[in-house]
Image (tube, rainbow, N blue to C red):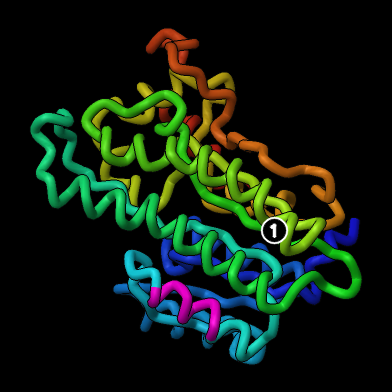
Amino acid sequence: MNLQLDDATVLITGASGGIGWALAEAFAAEGAQLVLHGHTAAARLSQRVAGEGWSDRALCVQADIRDPGEVARIFNEGETRFGRIDVAIANAGIWPPAAQALDELPLDRIQDTVAVNLMGAAWTARAWMAGLRRLGPRADGRGASLILVGSTAGRFGEPGHADYAMTKSALHGLMRSVKNEVVHLDPYARANTVEPGWTVTPMAEAALDEPGAIAGVARTMALRQLARPVDIARACVVLASPAASRHVSGEILTVAGGMEGRHLWRPDQIDEAAVRTRLADD
């Protein structure tokens, strides 16, 4: 199936991370032009892009996602290089690893998590809409697409990580507001959310390496396996596609193996070695 992304320009925030880089690879495979944002790892991101031979169709931009002016600059540089940003993916995020009750969380940690995860996504959506207001719809009628990368923590909560959970929950309201506003700028533009569960990324590896962590996670999932970054990226590709998801807007696609907020399996029914092995499968 032709996903109609071969001449699209796709902007990805947090492209140097596990899911971010998988997103870059997935959209590159579809022939898209890429605007890739990085912050502290921006230099490494540029090296990886050069190593893939994407320099003619990928632009790397260093910026602090917490600053709305910086986010607007990412879009402006992308538009200067490639024209309209057809797909924007607000993927940049942080998950502070220390587990602390809300009343014990340092105020600066809460404020920083909100600034990156929630406001960074809001600034991304805002800059994307501003670009559509400037440049208007595509002549071929392929609507623009915004994808917010959320988390199952926004649905079920996460003890010790209320700051993270509340930012991901707030993305639901942001996305469902934007999907009603953006159609006044591009009549076929869409906004959706992809909601990963536990995914094996550098950000999550330390937590998953704790004794019993994988078994505990797998007990809440019908599919006793963890997600890989490519699983999230492929879901985003489908939602971004004006062919595959032309009539899909305002939706939350959960990619979490059938996770529920309760245990579905006894500890003796979880083979942790088998769960780890599944990570290598295609």
Q: Is residue 145 magenta?
A: no
* Callout 1 crowding tier (Cα within 10 Å): few <14, some 14–19, many ≥20: many
The amino acid type found where label 1 is placed reads Ser
Q: Position of residue 57 (x, y in %)?
A: 66, 85
- Nearest the viewer among 43 and 63 is 63
Above or below: residue 74 compared with residue 154: below
Tell me if I can see residue 79 in this picture: yes
- Nearest the viewer among 209 and 130 is 130
Residue 136 lies left or right of residue 36; in this view the side is right
- Total numbered labels: 1
Residue 84 lies left or right of residue 226; in this view the side is right
Q: Position of residue 84 (x, y in %)?
A: 69, 78
Q: Position of residue 68 (x, y in %)?
A: 39, 69
Above or below: residue 262 compared with residue 98: above
Quarter placement of the N terminus: bottom right
Above or below: residue 77 compared with residue 178: below
Residue sticking out furthest to the front = 184
Q: For mark 1, give the secondary structure.
A: strand
- Residue position for label 1: 145
Above or below: residue 106 compared with residue 89: above
Tell me if I can see residue 198 in this picture: no
Instruction: From the image, give the main secondary structure of the stretch colored magenta.
Output: helix
Residue 125 lies left or right of residue 61; in this view the side is right
The residue shown at (57%, 29%) is 257
- Nearest the viewer among 215 and 191 is 191
The residue shown at (32%, 28%) is 158
The residue shown at (55%, 38%) is 278
Q: What are the residue bounds of the magenta stretch?
A: 69-76
Asked which quadrant contains residue 104, the reply is top left
